[in-house]
Image (cartoon, grey):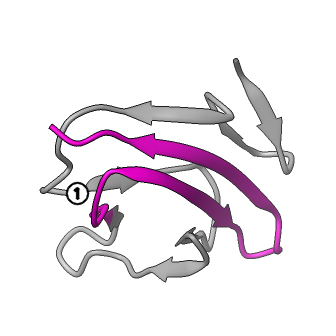
Amino acid sequence: VHRRVARKYSFQNALGHIDGPAARGLVLAATGEGLRWYVDGAEIAPDRASGRAVWKPPSAGFYDISVVDKDGRKARARVRINSG
């Protein structure tokens, strides 16, 4: 399912599904300027080395991921993380 949200931003699935441990982290990516990423309402700070938003899920479960651009446009998806 492809869902277009907030003009430029889209998530491939309304409910994403990620299998396996994410100990190294997941890179959150979108096209746009001045992007800010949030997981369950908490902002994800860019990685110091790469400048990318890297999220390390604390455990398996469901999470809300959102991205907001410099103009306040927002896209959101709910993902499920499975462990190992």
Q: Amino acid at mark 1?
A: Gly
- Name which quarter of the figure residue 50 lies in: bottom left
Q: Is residue 71 left or right of residue 63?
A: right
- Asked if residue 26 is among those painted magenta in the image, a careful observer would answer no
| Residue located farthest toward the top when viewing the structure as drawn | 1
Residue extent of the magenta highlight: 55-84
x then y, percent, for residue 12: 61, 28
Q: Quadrant of the N terminus?
A: top right
Q: Is residue 1 left or right of residue 63?
A: right
- Please say if 23 is above or below 12: below
Q: Secondary structure at mark 1?
A: loop
Write the residue at 85% across / 51% down: 6
- Please say if 54 is above or below 41: above
Write the residue at 70% across / 53% down: 76
**Closest to the observer: 42 or 31?**
42
Q: Is residue 32 left or right of residue 45?
A: right
x then y, percent, for residue 14: 68, 34
Q: Residues within 10 Å of mark 1 (few under 14, many from 20)?
A: few
Q: Which residue is mark 1?
A: 25
Write the residue at 52% across / 81% down: 43
**Closest to the observer: 39 or 53?**
39
Q: Quadrant of the C terminus?
A: top left
Write the residue at 28% across / 59% down: 59
* Mark count: 1
- Please say if 53 is above or below 32: below
x then y, percent, for residue 4: 80, 34
- Asked if residue 70 is among those painted magenta in the image, a careful observer would answer yes
x then y, percent, for residue 40: 57, 70
